[in-house]
Amino acid sequence: MAEFGFNEHHQNEIINYMRFARSKRVLRLKTIDSCFEELKDSRLVEETFTVDEVKEMLDELQAVVRGEVEMELINTAHTNVLLLRQLFSQAEKFYLRLQSDISELENRELLEQVAEFEKTDFKTTDKINKETSKPKLAPLNESGVSELLNKEIVRLQQENDKLRARLRTLESQAMSALDEKSRAERALKDLQRVQGEQQVAAQSKEINSLEDTVAALKEDYERSLSANVATQKDLQDNLISSKHELLRVQEQLALAEKELEKKFQQTAAYRNMKEILTKKNEQIKEIRKRLQRYEPNE
């Protein structure tokens, strides 16, 4: 098996995997054999069978065997995937990029040599001299591991140096930003204090102006109130005087009317008019008496 390009450790790993695969294969073959034995014991109890019965038994056996084989194939494929995953994970730790040639998996010559190796209990008997065109992964010795590790250490140190330099730059920028922030906060506080003082002064001035305005309005109101009281008193006095004057004028007018009526009654025209009215009244009375006498019903 050394002809495949593996060292003793890798060869032992391959032998372990082949033994694991052979044990799984033997177990699955025993399961298939048990399916046939179960069919013999459960169904082949009579001497003769019809065609339909034989067909039914074969169909059932086919379904069972198919299920077992399919399960084994699926399990084998999944197991290979897990094995590849382990190999790729280990290779990535050393920054190795593995490549696989799927066509080599169907190489009959290599498959026959693997089968021969398995038959001889994993002991190398034949040599494989033919080299494939695909590049193979060279054995990884201790010096190669050290070299890769040293390169990785150097690379990590360089990255750390770059990160430290970047960190120092960011710290400097952060300190500058903090200083700018502190200065801005102090300037803002000073501005707020000045604005507050100016606002307080403006408010005080406005309050004083309002107080002066209120005092002036109050003084004007009191002065207007006093003037209104004096004016109201004068108006009341004038009203009383006017009422007295009106009563006196009315009294004089009444006396004048009486005097005028008295003088009018003493004139000849008034006496003549009074005599005419008296005669007319007597004539009206006489006419009414006559009407009552001639037309009593009406």
Image (cartoon, rainbow, N blue to C red):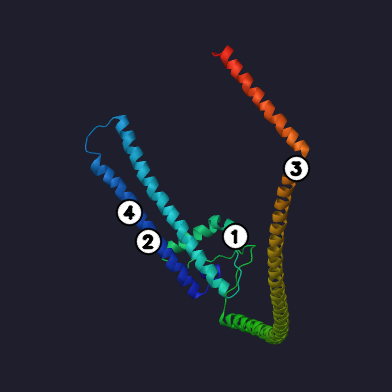
Q: Position of residue 109 (x, y in %)?
A: 54, 57
Kindly identify which numbered label has been placed on residue 264. Answer: 3
Residue 43 to residue 17: above or below:
above
Q: Nearer the viewer, mark 4 or mark 3?
A: 3
Residue 176 image-quadrant placement: bottom right
Q: Name which of mark 1 and mark 2 comes first in the sequence.
A: 2
Q: CA distance from mark 4 to mark 2?
A: 11 Å
Residue at (54%, 57%) from the top-left corner?
Answer: 105
**Amino acid type of disc 2?**
Ser
4 or 3: tag closer to the N-terminus: 4
Residue 10, position in %: x, y? 50, 72
Indicate which disc residue 23 carries: 2
**Element under disc 1:** loop
Q: Which residue is mark 4?
A: 30
Find residue 182 and report its horizontal and vertical position in percent: 68, 86
First along the sequence among labels 4 and 1: 4
Disc 4, disc 3: CB below 8 Å?
no
| Residue 101: mark in rendering | 1
Q: Which of pointers 3 and 1 lies earlier in the amino acid sequence?
A: 1
Q: Amino acid at mark 3?
A: Phe
Image quadrant holding the C terminus, namely top right
Q: Amino acid at mark 4?
A: Lys
Q: Secondary structure at mark 4?
A: helix
- In terms of image quadrants, where is residue 47? top left
Residue 193 visible within the image: yes
Packing grade of label 1 (10 A; few <14, some 14-19, many >=20) is few
Does residue 122 appear in the picture of this structure? no
